[in-house]
């Protein structure tokens, strides 16, 4: 199996959820496990879904314009991920 096939993929959609493809372990803000049953999971990033943390399509009817972030700017100035540590 290639390394590419082993890695999960998170796709940023335009004005919509994060689409997470592949096996994941999802935990909430308290660290409690959230059951994941689908191969592709849509994670809400507008904050308006009634089925948090999953997208329920509400982003289509509420004003929501996430800022586009080029992949090259995902790292901090020292070359470290903002999620590290
Ligand atoms: S991104 Fe779809 S409901 Fe929030």
Image (spheres, rainbow, N blue to C red):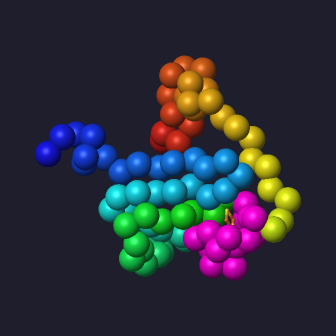
Task: Using residue 21 as the reference point, say whether residue 11 is left or right of it.
Answer: right
**Which quadrant does ligand 1 occupy?**
bottom right
Considering depth in this image, is 49 or 31 the residue closer to the camera?
49
x, y (%) of residue 69? 66, 34
Considering depth in this image, is 60 or 8 the residue closer to the camera?
60
Q: Residue at x 50, y 28 (%)?
A: 80
Residue 62 vertical position relative to residue 34 in the rendered view, above or below: above
Q: Residue at x 63, y 64 (%)?
A: 44
The span picked out in magenta is 46-60
Task: Using residue 24 as the reference point, say whether residue 66 is left or right of it.
Answer: right
View extreme (left): residue: 1
x, y (%) of residue 32? 47, 75
x, y (%) of residue 6? 25, 48
Considering depth in this image, is 53 or 38 the residue closer to the camera?
38
Residue 30 vertical position relative to residue 17 in the rendered view, above or below: below
Q: Is residue 6 among what the camera can see?
A: yes
Q: Residue at x 27, y 40 (%)?
A: 4
Q: Is residue 29 among what the camera can see?
A: no
Task: Count the numbered circles shown.
Answer: 0
Residue 35 vertical position relative to residue 69 in the rendered view, above or below: below
Q: Quadrant of the N terminus?
A: top left
Q: Is residue 56 magenta?
A: yes
x, y (%) of residue 31? 49, 69
View extreme (right): residue: 63
Task: Using residue 39 as the reference point, say whether residue 63 is left or right of it.
Answer: right
Most common SS among magenta residues: loop
Q: Is residue 68 magenta?
A: no
Q: Quadrant of residue 74?
A: top right
Q: Residue at x 51, y 22 (%)?
A: 79
């Amino acid at each position: 199996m290639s390394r590419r096939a082993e890695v999960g993929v998170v796709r940023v959609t335009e004005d919509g959820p994060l689409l997470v493809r592949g096996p994941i372990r999802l935990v909430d803000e308290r660290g409690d496990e959230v059951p994941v049953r689908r191969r592709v999971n849509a994670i809400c990033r507008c904050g308006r879904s009634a089925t948090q943390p999953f997208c329920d399509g509400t982003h289509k009817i509420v004003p929501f314009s996430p800022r586009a972030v080029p992949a090259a700017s995902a790292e901090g100035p020292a070359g470290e991920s903002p999620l590290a540590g």
